[in-house]
Each structure stands twice: as structure tokens, then as C-alpha cells.
């Protein structure tokens, strides 16, 4: 899994790598990682938000692709086809 590189965008894969590392750190901690739980939860929230964003952008691209396939039809400002 890719590590975080400063200046590069954070990806789902980067967050998954961070969660893997946190799991190891937490398992080896004397308190079973309870101290690190807020970090774990933040990483999970960030990953879930990025997944949701990626899904939404995929839906946008799919819709745009469908619209460009409709030959001879244009979208008006009212959202109706002519």
C-alpha cells in the first residue's frame, strides 16, 4: 500500500495503509490501543468520506457520459430535453 507522500493527494489506499499501521501499533500498545482510538476513528471517517466522494464523482461522470451520447439533444437551463 502506498505511504503518504507530502504534497501528494491522500487516497483511499493511503488511508487503508494508515489503518493497517494503526492496527499494528494499537495491538502492541499496553492499553490495547485505547489511547489511539480517536486517531483510528478519524482515519476511518476520512476513508469513508473519500469513498463517498469518489462514488459521487463516478455518478457525475456516468451521467455526463450518458448525456453526451444523446445525439441531437441539448439540455436547457430548465433541465428539459429539446
Image (cartoon, rainbow, N blue to C red):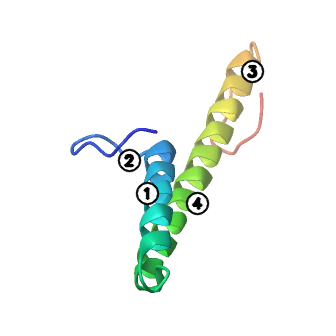
Image quarter of residue 62 = top right
Q: At x 71% / y 42%, what residue is drawn?
A: 79
The residue identified by callout 3 is: 73
The residue identified by callout 4 is: 48
Disc 1, SS: helix
The residue identified by callout 1 is: 21
Q: Earlier in the sequence, mark 3 or mark 2?
A: 2
Whole-percent x and y of residue 61? 62, 32
Cα–Cα gap, marks 3 and 2: 39 Å
Discs 1, 2 touching: Cβ within 8 Å:
no
Q: Nearer the viewer, residue 63 or 31?
A: 31
Q: Earlier in the sequence, mark 4 or mark 2?
A: 2
Cα–Cα gap, marks 4 and 2: 13 Å
Q: At x 52% / y 53%, what residue is drawn?
A: 50
Give above or below for 71 relative to 27: above
Cα–Cα gap, marks 3 and 1: 51 Å
Cα–Cα gap, marks 1 and 2: 16 Å
Amino acid at each position: 500500500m502506498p505511504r503518504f507522500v507530502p504534497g501528494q493527494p491522500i487516497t483511499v489506499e493511503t488511508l487503508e495503509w494508515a489503518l493497517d499501521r494503526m492496527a499494528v501499533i494499537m495491538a502492541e500498545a499496553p492499553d490495547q490501543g485505547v489511547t489511539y482510538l480517536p486517531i483510528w476513528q478519524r482515519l476511518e471517517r476520512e476513508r469513508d468520506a473519500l469513498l463517498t466522494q469518489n462514488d459521487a464523482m463516478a455518478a457525475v461522470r456516468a451521467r455526463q457520459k450518458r448525456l453526451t451520447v444523446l445525439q441531437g439533444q441539448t439540455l436547457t437551463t430548465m433541465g428539459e430535453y429539446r
